[in-house]
Image (cartoon, rainbow, N blue to C red):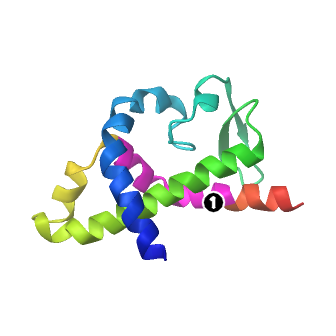
Amino acid sequence: MQGLFAIIFLLLLQVTQGFFHQHSSLCAGFRHRCSSYHPKIMTTTRTATIDDEGEEEVRAEDMDDETELAILQNDVVWIEAIEERNKAQLESFNNEQDQWDSMTDWEQDLLTNKESHMKRIEVLTKRLEA
């Protein structure tokens, strides 16, 4: 079943990557935390705070934890789809660097920030369970 989801998301990724590439500047200041195009994020004021681990948290003031968690989880689905696609297409490139260079800024940004997304998801999940 996960394979079917990966294929569906790969197809969606191919169709929508042009849209996200064109609109990547909309997310510029907030991209490292929530890189998906989401109207609520784009219309809110951003704040930066330091969390308990000493890391900077950047989030929209009026975005609740559930919304941020959903956006980050969506990003992780995109990341997994991109990783699956990259595995399948690696042989068509000279090397991994050529493949990296062929990706859009949006795709590179998602892959670069996978670990921070996973940490933030963990923090939000614990906060919502409390």
Quadrant location, the C terminus: bottom right
Crowd around label 1: few <14 · some 14–19 · many ≥20 (10 Å) = few
Q: Magenta residues, as a range?
A: 106-121
Q: Residue at x 74, y 30 (%)?
A: 61
Kind of residue sitting beneath label 1? Lys
Q: Is residue 32 above or below residue 48?
A: below
Instruction: Please give left or right for residue 57 compared with residue 126 in the image.
Output: left
Which residue of the protein is positioned furthest toward the right in this rendering? 130
Q: Secondary structure beneath disc 1?
A: helix
Which residue of the protein is positioned furthest toward the left in this rendering? 94
The verdict on residue 111 being magenta is: yes
The verdict on residue 6 being magenta is: no
Asked whether 51 or 68 is in front, the reply is 68
Chief secondary structure of the magenta portion: helix
Numbered marks: total: 1
Q: Is residue 57 above or below residue 2?
A: above
**Residue indicated by mark 1:** 119
